[in-house]
Amino acid sequence: MENEVWLTRLEAREETVLHDLSSEYGRAARAIAYRILENRADAEECENEALLRLWNSIPPQRPDSVRAFYLRIVRNLAIDRYRAQTGKNTCSLEELGDVVPAETEDAVEQKALTETLNAFLADQPRKNRVMFVRRYFYGWSITELARDAGMRENAVSALLYRMRRSLQEYLERKGILS
């Protein structure tokens, strides 16, 4: 379904839209949450909480992609739950912690960071970009990335390390990091 149709249905408070969103994107949502939490029940709770938050966010928000907006909510909920349960970040977020500034409450700063990160990724070879997003957004393990790419785990780790260093230099050049 197209983004405008989702937005129209959400804005009209059409109750069946949540069921339809779950049918369309629920599998991806649960997969993201499960990769972070490694618990199916917790992953399902994150999916359901994300649907409620999506319902309460639109309107007033009108995201460019309802799918991406929904999956980001799921991811953030899973990360918050993981932190509450363990007292630490997920492994993949700890890798990025030294490179990317922590999320900020300032919407302008967050938007600038997002745009800069997107520009950095757009300049990367497709294989690298896909691995980066799978690792740091979808929470894939190094083993899963290596298997999918037909590479050795240490090669994937080295590639991601070089990308994080390149990202850090890029953010410094753009004035996001000092």
Image (tube, rainbow, N blue to C red):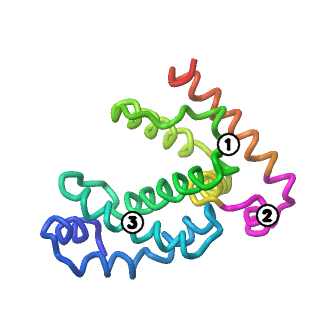
Q: Secondary structure at mark 1?
A: helix
Q: Is residue 125 visible?
A: no
Q: Residue at x 26, y 64 (%)?
A: 55
The local crowd at label 3, few if under 14, some if 14 to 19, many if 20 or more residues have their Cα within 10 Å, is some
Q: Amino acid at mark 3?
A: Glu
Name the residue nearer the viewer: 33 or 12. Answer: 33
Pick the quarter of the image with the N terminus: bottom left
Of 49 and 131, nearer the camera is 49
Q: Residues within 10 Å of mark 2 (few under 14, many from 20)?
A: some
Which residue lies at the image location 62% right of the left edge and 45% below the top edge?
A: 124
Say whether marks 3 and 2 touch (CB < 8 Å): no
Q: Name the residue carrying label 3.
A: 49
Indicate the position of residue 65 as horizontal and vertical percent values. Answer: 34, 59
Q: Which residues are magenta?
A: 140-156
Tell me the distance, in whole angstroms, between the alpha carbons under discs 3 and 1.
Answer: 25 Å
As drawn, the label of residue 94 is: 1
Question: Circle 2 is placed at which residue position?
Answer: 143
Looking at the rendered image, the disc whose residue lies closer to the viewer, 1 or 2, is 1
Please state which of the two labelled residues, at mark 3 or mark 1, is closer to the viewer: 3
Using the numbered discs, state the Cα–Cα distance from disc 1 to disc 2 in whole angstroms: 17 Å
At x 70%, y 50%, the residue is: 91
Q: Earlier in the sequence, mark 1 or mark 2?
A: 1
- Amino acid at circle 1: Glu
Q: Would you say 116 lies left or right of 134 here? A: left
Does 64 sit above or below residue 150? above
Q: Return the x and y of residue 75 as percentages of the image width and height.
A: 50, 58
Q: Is residue 53 left or right of residue 94?
A: left
Q: Looking at the image, which is closer to me, 155 or 139?
A: 139
> Quadrant where the C terminus lies?
top right
Q: Image quadrant of residue 38?
A: bottom right
Circle 3 — which element? helix
